[in-house]
Amino acid sequence: MTDAELSRKVFELGEAQLTPTSHLFAQFGPVKIIEASQQHAAGYTKLSRSRPAVRLIEVVLAANRNYNKVVKPNIDRISRETDLQTFHQLVELIRSKSAPEFYEFWGHRDAKKYQVLTEILNRLPELRRRYPAAPDDFHLLNSWAVDVDLAHYKEDIIGEIKFVAIATTQHLRMCFGCNTVKPDQRVKEVLQRVLGYPPMSNTKVVQAVEHLSAITGLSALVVDQIFVNYGSGYFNRDSR
């Protein structure tokens, strides 16, 4: 497809309505995907700014999990029942609990995800040395997110952590204010099944969506949300 055809197709996807299995259906109902995507993108960093520790937990738990069914209920519970806000509070919380006790707290018995969370927290002192002007936790990770070199993400201070793949790196960058995309299953499905792209590496998927962002004038985050909600709503009929 030409760039003009690709752009037109993206907007056609956006004109479709959310279905009950679309990621944002519970929040917005049967509205146009582009409308829900734009509204959602506008508030995408709200939790990251107000309760960065909860958002970090959310990102770690979301890897390879059904968000609406498995992750969101636990994040809602933590947000409702605790005053957890800062990374410092989260570090102290983990120190005060055994691993099994923390599993009960965040609702998952997953040693790999627990390791990822603790390793990210262990990197915070180095990040604070790198970004001494960051006034709070949100801006600390925002500074990191903006500086990530995607071509060398495996050498990044967070990307190098065991079990942190490019999708988690990208998700974390998005949640802390970077305008980019998470190369997950739904995004890949739309690129291949609707827009005619061949199977690509995760890095190429990110580059493809960022190109679509440039030619449509939509933010990469909005394009990401259009694809996620179309894919979850019209392909596998299972929410992200």
Image (spheres, rainbow, N blue to C red):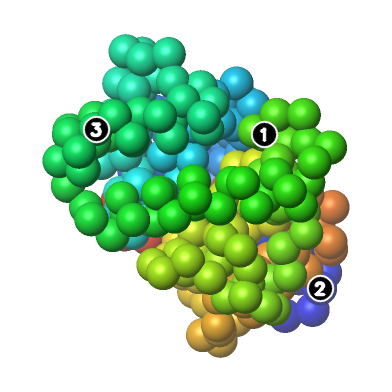
Q: Residue at x 77, y 29 (%)?
A: 135
Of circles 1 and 2, the one toward us is 1
Q: Are marks 1 and 3 in contact (CB under 8 Å)?
A: no
The residue tagged 3 is 97
Percent position of residue 3, x then y: 81, 73
Camera-side residue of 15 and 142? 142
- Report which quarter residue 32 is drawn in: top right
Amino acid type of the residue tagged 1 in the rendering: Phe
Amino acid type of the residue tagged 3 in the rendering: Lys
Per the rendering, the mark at residue 138 is 1
Q: Residue at x 51, y 85 (%)?
A: 199
Q: Residue at x 39, y 56 (%)?
A: 116
10 Å crowding of disc 1: few (<14), some (14-19), many (20+): many
Q: Residue at x 44, y 55 (%)?
A: 119
Q: Element under label 1?
A: helix
Percent position of residue 203, x then y: 62, 76
Quick one: label 2 or label 3, which is nearer the N terminus?
A: 2
Percent position of residue 176, x then y: 65, 42
Camera-side residue of 100 and 169? 100
Percent position of residue 28, x then y: 49, 26
The residue tagged 2 is 3
Quadrant of the rendering where the N terminus is positioned: bottom right
Amino acid type of the residue tagged 2 in the rendering: Asp
